[in-house]
Image (cartoon, grey):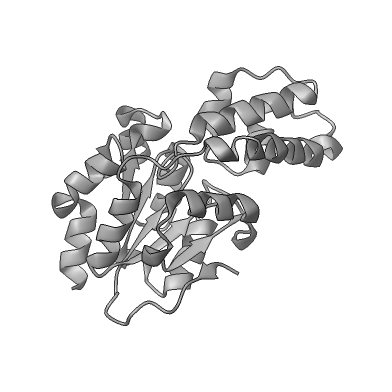
Amino acid sequence: MPTTEPAAPARRRGAVLFDVDGTLIDSSYLHTLAWWQAFRQAGYDVPMAGIHRSVGMGGDRILDRLLPADRDTDADADILTSQAAVFSTFWPALRRLDGARALLAQCHDSGLAVALASSARDRDLEILRAVIDADAYIHAATSSADAKESKPAPDILAAALDAVGVAAENAVYVGDAVWDIYAAGALGIPAIGLTCGGTGEAELREAGAVEVYESPRALLDNLAGSAIGALASRVR
């Protein structure tokens, strides 16, 4: 079940959902490197550029997208385990992106529920939350265990909405990958794209992002005029 903090006050009729890796934490390229090493260990030479463009999808989808269709899929679990092990070696290097904590705090103080709609593994999510250091402003968080299908399917977002008790029409999603934008679009949720994960503005807009900013700090600096600010005013 999604990790849920004490019930959000009744006045919180709207919600902001946040992706975590690449959106609040500077980890997209560390995930790329972890996948690259896991693939190499399994005998696959996959270019990093292709891996990076797939980060944000669930691990099962990354395997299907980047590896041969006729591979021995019995080895997929070992690759996933290897990727997780390599990524864990980067935990000490993880840093939250500039403005991430303050952005969550401002959304919270604007009367909106704040949920982390992440498909990270449970243990990774614990580490990511510690790095963000903003639990006082987070009402709920999801992990890969909360979704039957991974992004770009919208299951993770639906689980986060359920956890805070907010309808999709009263939510905004913030993510850094096209897979985040597609997932939000499947539920009719306006999505704000951030380029700090390494995906350009044009790609994010083409995927359906209603706004694009460089970083959490840039979004925070423009929050009042953003889709989040409009939502806070509408549901207040």
Q: Give the answer, above or below, for where 232 lies relative to 37.
A: below
Quadrant where the N terminus sits is: bottom right
Tell me which residue sits at (34%, 47%) in the image. 100
Residue 202 percent coordinates (x, y): 31, 28
Tell me which residue sits at (47%, 72%) in the image. 5
Number of marks in the image?
A: 0
Residue 200 percent coordinates (x, y): 35, 27
Q: Quadrant of residue 195?
A: top left
Q: Nearer the viewer, residue 164 or 89?
A: 89
Residue 90 percent coordinates (x, y): 60, 35
Quadrant where the C terminus sits is: bottom left
Q: Give the answer, above or below, for where 47 lies relative to 188.
A: above
Tell me which residue sits at (49%, 62%) in the image. 141
Q: Nearer the viewer, residue 197 or 99?
A: 99
Q: Quadrant of residue 7?
A: bottom left
Residue 223 percent coordinates (x, y): 19, 51
Residue 163 lies left or right of residue 110; in this view the side is right
Tell me which residue sits at (46%, 67%) in the image. 140
Q: Nearer the viewer, residue 210 or 97?
A: 97
The answer to whether residue 180 of the structure is visible from this angle is yes
Q: Give the answer, above or below, for where 111 lies relative to 35.
A: below
The answer to whether residue 121 of the structure is visible from this angle is no
